[in-house]
Image (tube, helix red, strand yellow):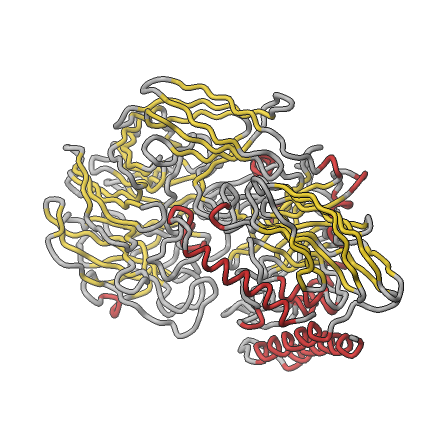
Amino acid sequence: MNKTAMRSSVGLLALALLAMLATRPAAAQAGRYPASRHGGNYMFNFYFPPSPSSTPWAPAWAPDGRSVAVAMAGSIWRVDLASGAADELTYGETYHSSPDWSPDGRWIVYTADHDGEAVQLEILDVAAGEAHALTDDDQIYADPVFSPDGTRVAYVATTPSGYFNVYIRSIADGRWSGEAVAVTRDNDFGRNRLYFGPWDMHLTPAWLPDGNELLLVSNRNIPLGSGHVLRVPARAGGIDDATAVLREQTLYRTRPDVASDGRRFVYSSTGGAADQFSNLYVQPTAGGEPYKITFFQHDAFHPRWSPDDEWIAFITNEGGLPQLALLETHGGALRTVTIERRRWKRPMGVLSVATRDAATGAATGARIHLTASDGKFYAPADAYARVGGQGDHVFHHTGRFTVEVPAGLTELTVVKGFEYWPEEVSVEVGPGAVAELTVDLRRMTDMAAKGWYSGSTHVHMNYGGNLHNTLENLVMMSAAEDQDVVNEQVANKDNRILDYQFFVPGGGPHPASTPEHLVVVGQEYRPPFYGHVFMFGMRDHLISPFTMGYEGTAIESLYPSNTDMFRKAKAQGATVAYVHAFGGEADPLDGNLGGGKGFLVDAALGTTDGIEWSDAARAGFFPVYAAWNNGLRVTATGGEDSISNLHRSKIVGSVRTYVHTGVRGLDMDAWFEGLREGRAFVSSGPLVELTANGRMAGETVALPAGGGSVALAGRVESITPLERVFVVCRGEERADIPLRGDRRSVAFDIELDIDRSGWCHLRAEGHPSERAPLDVSYAQAFTNPIWITVGDQPVRDAASAEYGMRWIDRLRAMAEEWPGWRSERERQHVFAQFDEARAIYAGFAAEAP
């Protein structure tokens, strides 16, 4: 490979992309919470409330014990526990959540989410029905809670430096009456912690009845998880005198609440990873042994004592969607509070929508983007409201839905994958009226008719999120996105193994499969050092443990390597590949080797079948081209890493793999066989096809010893406009295909002269400003290579081989610094694999012309 040429090509594109990103509208970047320097998808899903939730969230008892305030549909509601009637108490331009009543029942303090840009505090005068802001800046505020006497509010904020700290502030008559007092302060752990970073966080304060102390959750000086439960004096610098009363690995869900007697608190926990699910526990506030009080095979979140301590309100996802529930403290009676009716503060109407396949007239599921007349998003009460990776509010449905929306004009975008044209429609909804709408979805192309079947290689069903997902619901979402193959991955979250019970030995499709949709349950093996990988089609058992190199545990060593575990999985018949390996635009070798550090080792040793794209990105082409340029036939795959039960996650199928199975149709063995052989393309929207002398991706064109001309025929179709379509051979751009008209399709026939063995593939890219409704930063698709041999020349490139050697040298240096090795034997075993792979690249360099 000509590294200079490749850097020039990709580097100029990267600079262009940066310039494009600078002009992106703010709305396209929604959902990022820029004030948080803790950041990350885990924080936003497990800690921040959903904005909005289509069902109740964050319960708070009224002082009279007869009703509960909840967040729902972007507002704060009061739910009458006897009747199930819900009254909307707040309404505004933002999404409201996390309510807490003042002890006298006059006020409710709550959070106001500016659609991911900031989260502020507001307060409601309940009797007057009037609310006003308590904060007005660009920071994040969370977990507001009144003191027992109502004169102070404890809360979490990102001030001053972007890290989460607990503050107390005096309040009187609904207004601040003093300055904020910092109970905690920024503290550097001293090194980067997996998923949690170097800076400590302090979360979810809960008052003890005397008002002199708080319980809070903090990972202060703790290597794993979001933290222990600490008992802290409620004063400036109280963290200095904190006492740990519960020590376990947590994931933001703990949310302690103290009983009125002050001697016990209730909280949500996985029992330090003993459970897949969060259950409810009680424990003494002075410390002691936890006592489990629920035994669900689903989650229980956000527990809150009733004023008399006889009941605990919490959120259950037993039926899938989060719902309000009550647990009798002494007796164990359990009751789900069904919302029987919603009484809104403003004129509302009902929108009833049916979506159909325009060709057949049959009902068909789709993804819905909805903006009501007030500029906000609403979802049906039986749908899971989510925010995609690009900040778009969406929900999926099966073909018909009904939703309450503010009176006025409602705008919808209806999307069904990459092969149907999106439809943008608007409808006027009258107050108290029902508006009926039918949307016919027109097919752009039919890839299955050509033998191509699509599926993301990276989807998680349950991962500690608010939704209790099922395979059937996952199939529904995948069908709404027009995918054929549903590849669900069992995985660890910290020490928990989620969805392991859905693995079925035998190596075939899961029994939940239908004639239209294959369901495959495999595994994501997740070592943080080498890089995460997928394993599909294992005949006997899941690979255990699910990770290596996990700090502070008995599996902290870098032995066994990914190479070892790949071999164990492949011995069971698995197809394996590195996942979400290289994001962004820069060469991973110029940084820390990205998320696929072991890739070039396993590419050389033949132990990985592929490498996965999880977003639109060009960084992966640097190591992938280095592998292809030396004849290493690793397949590029597409899998967005959708964690489908989180409320903020990439949309299922937003990056996927199309595999050509030909006359074998929708068949699991044929699909994975085609993937391994490279008869595949990666897409986040565009559909790309390329042949060379009639050969497709994964196949070989043989030329005579002197080389010759190769006829390339290509076709690109896209539901969004494209900016570039071009052919790359041996890492260098060989042809730029002009786009005309609406820039959504092009077909071409060209000839290229080839004088060295190598490969060619087709790439298509769009502009970031034109990515909607795709859930990626810009449209991207590319085929796997068509291999071209000239005489008996092997595919070799000295610069690419040297790239592989430098990569492995960097990897070895990083591994040598790893503190968790258990023995020299382990080190030498892994380093021997590095040496073997490096020697292969050295051999390639020697063979290169």
- Residue 166 visible (yes or no): yes
Quadrant of the rendered structure where residue 94 is? top left
Task: List the single residue furthest toward the top.
Answer: 433
User: Where 95 falls versus 401 (above or below)?
Assistant: below
User: Where 476 falls versus 286 (above or below)?
Assistant: above
User: Where 375 falls versus 681 (above or below)?
Assistant: above
Q: Is residue 413 left or right of residue 176?
A: right
Quadrant of the rendered structure where residue 70 is? top left
- Residue 531 visible (yes or no): no
Percent across and percent down for residue 152 are 16, 52
Q: Is residue 80 left or right of residue 668?
A: left
Q: Is residue 347 left or right of residue 490?
A: left
Percent across and percent down for residue 306 are 27, 40
User: Where 7 falls versus 204 (above or below)?
Assistant: below
Quadrant (top left, top right, bottom left, bottom right) of the C terminus: bottom right
Nearer to us in this view, 171 or 238: 171
Percent across and percent down for residue 233 are 21, 63
| Residue depicted at 56% across the width and 40% down the height | 742
Nearer to us in this view, 179 or 257: 179
| Residue depicted at 39% across the width and 62% down the height | 247
